[in-house]
Amino acid sequence: MIQNLIDGVLTGSYISLGAIGLTLVMHILRFANFSHAELLSLGAYTALVFDGLVSGLSPVLAEKLAPLSLTWALILAIPISMVLTGLSALLIDRLIFRRVREKGQELSMVFASFGMALVVRNVIGLVFGLSPELYSKDIAFATVLSPDPLILVKPDQVFVLLAALVLMLILHLVLSRTTFGYALRAVAENPSLAQVNGVNLSRTIMYVWLIGGALAAVAGVFYGLSHQLIPVMGRDLVLPIFAATIVGGIGSVYGAVLGGFIVGIAGNMALVVLPSGYTPSVPFLLIIVVLMLRPHGLFGEARA
């Protein structure tokens, strides 16, 4: 059970990163973006490409950072992936979502996001094939923390958790202590009033897409380090990310973080009593329970 709890915390770290971008988009633009999880896939595969390119250009950077399975090449590929995935999210908004949004049809936005999810997923499958990919083919041995009960932790898991927490701390400082953070909250609460007070609405929305895409890229890479890369990973992650967003409360970054860890821990703890085939239903159950007991989530607030 302790092992399941530890694995749940790890899972929650990358679910939280994915949920942060989704909760910002849902709160500010007021639509359920079902293509958001595909940004995790896009970011993960983009990092894979640049990991290979950097390793090919400089074999020295292809060496592992023992005891991690990461290489310097992958470390350098992650920020590149963040930038490109953020720009891709912005491009999708400019080409698709903004045009639908300007017509004022919220339901059409949801259908458009479904369509984009399928497009991105199939393009990734077409380019990279359907076979699983790995960042490293070297075996990463787990460290035994306790022989009884048996508790195993891989160095990569510790890195993923610590890196995710650092990113969350940086985002907290940006949102709570910068002008952009104040502008973001103002736009989320009342876009018209925020514009009257000098907030550039278009620029704020642009930053939301960039931040959401960048964090999704990191979440995708962390998922790939913990599991493997497959073109349908976005499909597998969309429900946990939505569950984290709803549990935490739409619009709350801190709620998304907490919701991500709740979903991750609940899913792994369910393995104690349920066969693995039933655990994907846990996010559904969490969504239903939260909507029944607290419709606005743990940290969400009612909106007009």
Image (cartoon, rainbow, N blue to C red):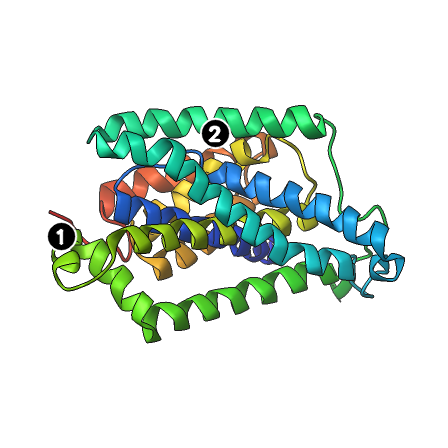
Left or right side of 265 for 104: left
Left or right side of 179 for 228: right
Residue under circle 1? Answer: 192
Q: In this view of the protein, can residue 11 be seen by the observer?
A: no
Question: Where, by quadrant of the figure, is residue 93 drawn?
Answer: top left
Q: Position of residue 33 (x, y in %)?
A: 37, 37
Left or right side of 163 for 290: left
- Residue drawn at x 38%, y 38% as measured from the top left: 94
Q: The disc labelled 1 sits on which kind of residue?
A: Ser
* Residue in the foreground of this view, choosing between 188 and 196: 196
Q: Residues within 10 Å of mark 1 (few under 14, many from 20)?
A: few
* Residue in the foreground of this view, choosing between 143 and 192: 192
- Residue drawn at x 80%, y 48% as measured from the top left: 136
* Residue in the foreground of this view, choosing between 194 and 188: 194
- Identity of the residue furthest to the bottom in this view: 177
Q: CA distance from mark 2 to mark 1?
A: 30 Å
Q: The disc labelled 2 sits on which kind of residue?
A: Ala
Q: Position of residue 119 (x, y in %)?
A: 51, 25
Q: Position of residue 156 (x, y in %)?
A: 71, 59
Q: In this view of the protein, can residue 170 be seen by the observer?
A: yes
- Residue drawn at x 40%, y 41% as measured from the top left: 242
Q: Residues within 10 Å of mark 2 (few under 14, many from 20)?
A: many
Q: Position of residue 170 (x, y in %)?
A: 47, 70
- Residue drawn at x 49%, y 47% as measured from the top left: 87
Left or right side of 113 for 192: left
Mark number displayed over residue 130: none
User: Which numbered disc, 2 or 1, marks the residue closer to the eye?
Assistant: 1
Q: Secondary structure at mark 1?
A: helix
Earlier-in-chain disc, 2 versus 1: 2
Residue under circle 2? Answer: 117
